[in-house]
Image: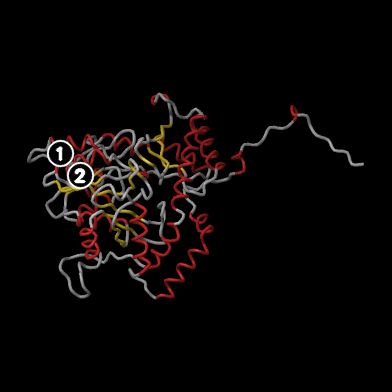
Amino acid sequence: MKTTFSSPPSAKPPSPKLSSVVESVPLLDLRRQYNEIREEVLAAIARVCDSQSFILGPEVEALEREISSFTGATQAVGCASGTEALWLALVAAGVKPGDSVITTPFSFFASASSIVRAGATPVFVDVDPDTLNLNAALVERAIRNHRPGNHGPANLRAILPVHLYGQCADTDAFNRLAQEFGVAIVEDAAQAIGAEWNGRGAGSLGVAAAFSFYPTKNLSAYGDAGIVTTTRPEMADHMRRLRNHGSPERYYHNEFGWNGRMDGIQAAVLRVKMKHIADWNQSRRQHAATYDRLLKDAGLTSNRASSAPVRPLARSPQAKHVFHQYVIRAERRDELRKFLAARKIGSEIYYPLPLHRQPVFSYLGLKEGDLPISEQAARDVLALPMFPELTDAEIQRVVESIADFYS
């Protein structure tokens, strides 16, 4: 007869940490998503190849309808990139040479370079210290305090808030400013597909909004692609002309536009992913909650900001965040990043140099210290691994490593 033995509960060895089997954690792993939807994607690409409709065409038109419905906008215009989407939105909103546009200095370069491409001058206003989104109170002050000859917004045509890291900026405040001062609100929603403000989708909060489908975004193409949404049909018609060399009819041109068209294969891939985006965004929110809990349990965050080595960004109660990035503000950020890299944990700095300190914008006359909140953020923000397929064990590995660094 076979005899079995079992140890009493007190003799049972301690369970290994969930993260002990995790050897590395990438900042982003696109292969995991592709493995889940590979057959759908390949079928969609084959459909385009069979149709031989490669530029614009039925796939782009279908995507435009789906995005407009998803965001709550009435119109969507597919284009070649998120940068192209920003330019289309600004020009269709009436921005022209000699105008100025207020925006944030704490964003990707395209937020401001698209203003310059439209012929206007970017006016940088500092960000909120808690969310790092454009500070509406400072924007109002900049408008009211403007006097001829200073660095204020002459011929102000638009305000371009960025929904940074997937959280909408204070749209209520910006829309009040738009009504009072007669300017357009153009959303830079490149990181915010599926985000909301007071129950309204990003992309329906201003006169127009620009989305990016760069491969790292929440909704990502297999190359460059973008889209503009608007609630104004006349603006959509204008953008469709602008993306096609300013042409309302083939070989006839009423204005100077650009070649900014979306291709059919990118639209087909995006249509496959559109069926999953709500679930993927929910996974990101769950991962963010796990980070929050584990960072707190590890004693890395505190209600007293001065005593905490790590501080997650604040979340506005009106906002439904989609966590394109999970960003912390960290003491000794650069040392921490090197420590994580040695443990094969990915991270990134979004953004290491504010736009007003970029050499190309030196002509604006802004200097170090003029926008101190953005400058400090550039010194301490750090994005941790975040993508839908991330596992709890990987998140635990990241947090344990951060705890080890500060111990």
Q: In the rendered structure, are the residues bearing label 2 and label 1 in contact, judged by CB atoms less than 8 Å apart?
A: yes
Out of 347 and 71, give the one closest to the viewer.
71
- The figure's colour scheme reads secondary structure
Packing grade of label 1 (10 A; few <14, some 14-19, many >=20) is: some
Q: Quadrant of residue 247?
A: bottom left
Q: Which amino acid is tagged 1?
A: Ile
Q: Earlier in the sequence, mark 2 or mark 1?
A: 2
Out of 198 and 157, give the one closest to the viewer.
198
Above-or-below relation of 241 to 89: below
Q: What residue lies at 54% left-to-right and 35% top-to-bottom? A: 400
Q: How many marks?
A: 2
Q: Which mark is residue 288?
A: none
Secondary structure at numbered mark 1? helix
Q: What residue lies at 30% left-to-right and 40% top-to-bottom? A: 133
Quadrant position of the N terminus in the picture: top right
Q: Position of residue 13 (x, y in %)?
A: 72, 32
Packing grade of label 2 (10 A; few <14, some 14-19, many >=20) is: many
Q: Position of residue 246 (x, y in %)?
A: 20, 67
Q: Position of residue 272 (x, y in %)?
A: 45, 61
Above-or-below relation of 373 to 103: above
Q: Which residue is mark 2?
A: 102
Label 2 to label 1: alpha-carbon separation = 9 Å
Out of 364 and 124, give the one closest to the viewer.
124
Q: Which amino acid is tagged 2?
A: Ile
Secondary structure at numbered mark 2? strand
Residue, far left:
148
Q: What residue lies at 47% left-to-right and 34% top-to-bottom? A: 292
Q: Which residue is mark 1?
A: 143
Above-or-below relation of 331 to 31: above
Q: Position of residue 26 (x, y in %)?
A: 50, 48
